Image (spheres, rainbow, N blue to C red):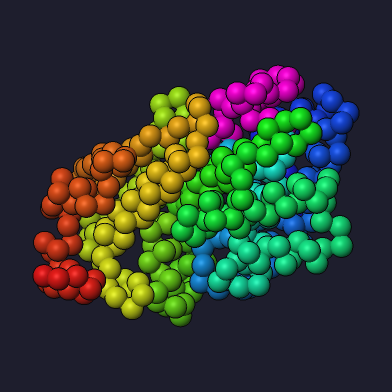
Amino acid sequence: MKNLVKISRIEKAFYEMAKADLKFQEYFFTYYAQKLIFLNQFYPHIEGTLTGYTDHGPDHITRILMLYEKMLKNNISAFESVDIPSSGNINFYELYLLLCATILHDVGNLLGRFDHPEKAKIIVDKVKNNFFVDDEMKRYALQMVSAHSGEDTIKKHIEREDVDYKNEEINLRFLGAILRFTDELEEGRVRVDRTYYDSIKDTMDQNQRIFWEISLLINRITPNPDGFEIEICAEIDEKNLFNLYKKKEKDVALIDELIFRIDKINNERKYYMEFVRKHLEYREIIFNLTITSTGNSPITISYKFNNDQGYEKFWKYQTHLNPENHIKDYFLQKGGVA
């Protein structure tokens, strides 16, 4: 029940918007009933089907809801008042869909990781009362769920960019992009239990370990909508920079995988920007990497990931960190050409 205590600010805003107009109240209560059922009866069992994966349970959902406060703080007017947002912001029906799709987006993992976004529909259809105000909203929410993972799935699974619902415009692809990108940003130490990891790491699939190690390096991810940027802070011990871990049966250095992971977030940012609405642009990622070493002061390296700078240019600027310069035949191990 601990997750139910964590009511996010975006949910409080949603409640205030519903309270201000009687016709909206059904939407709040169906959403909240959905949250209670899925976070308490479904998500706690996902760990059993995703052995060796980082957190995809109820706390993951709660943290995404909390992250929306930072992502959308300039686009939900009810953060400051009970007024219904203007057409330039996220309207009530869009907020309802975003919240419902967030609750459902990972529940398909109960049926296995492969194609889990599409499997959510199977589970939702089997719930006797699936807590949507109507089938139209259910269909839109499940399209967003299907689009939250995979290559170009927003265009593949969300049939139309805009739909009309009760005399309001709903931008479905925009909402799908918010869910997908925020889910990508819900990363780092918050998704791993260090004590649990230490107890299972020697027996888990060795191809999974690197994902836990990377999560443990990322201290903080903070959206700054006023500055149109995402700040990511990570910390690594100098002696661990070139530790090798298995990934798809190839050896990958820890520092290389960390930079690859930040670059993946940047690629998601670029995809998100294809569907963005005014005042929700995120134009770059400010990556701050602190390198610690025993007996020496920490060194912090800052690098901007954007449309022009990514993984390859990082290594041009930080050649001293490149595993190719430290590990014999490293590039060949990754399947490249020397």
Could you say where residue 153 lies in the image, as x and y percent from the top left? 52, 56
Q: Is residue 257 magenta?
A: no
- Taking the spot 86% from the left edge, 39% from the top edge, the residue there is 26
Report the front residue among 321 and 227: 227
- Taking the spot 76% from the left edge, 61% from the top edge, the residue there is 124
Could you say where residue 104 lies in the image, as x and y percent from the top left? 68, 55
Q: Is residue 78 magenta?
A: yes
- Taking the spot 73% from the left edge, 19% from the top edge, the residue there is 83
Could you say where residue 318 lies in the image, as x and y percent from the top left? 16, 48
Left/right placement of residue 177 relative to residue 145 reads left
Could you say where residue 28 lies in the image, as x and y percent from the top left? 80, 39
Tell me where residue 127 sits by quadrant: bottom right
Tell me where residue 157 sits by quadrant: bottom right
Report the front residue among 36 and 101: 101
Left/right placement of residue 5 relative to residue 226 reads right
Left/right placement of residue 331 relative to residue 94 reads left
Task: Please tell me whether residue 235 is drawn above or below residue 42 in the rendered image.
Answer: above
- Taking the spot 48% from the left edge, 50% from the top edge, the residue there is 184
Quadrant holding the C terminus: bottom left
Q: Is residue 152 visible?
A: yes
Give the overall secondary structure of the magenta segment.
loop
Task: Please tell me whether residue 168 is drawn above or below residue 30 in the rendered image.
Answer: above
Left/right placement of residue 68 relative to residue 107 reads left
Task: Please tell me whether residue 90 is drawn above or below residue 104 in the rendered image.
Answer: above
Q: Please provide the residue range marked out in magenta.
A: 69-92
- Tell me how many marks there are: 0
Report the front residue among 20 and 91: 91
Task: Please tell me whether residue 241 is drawn above or below residue 69 in the rendered image.
Answer: below
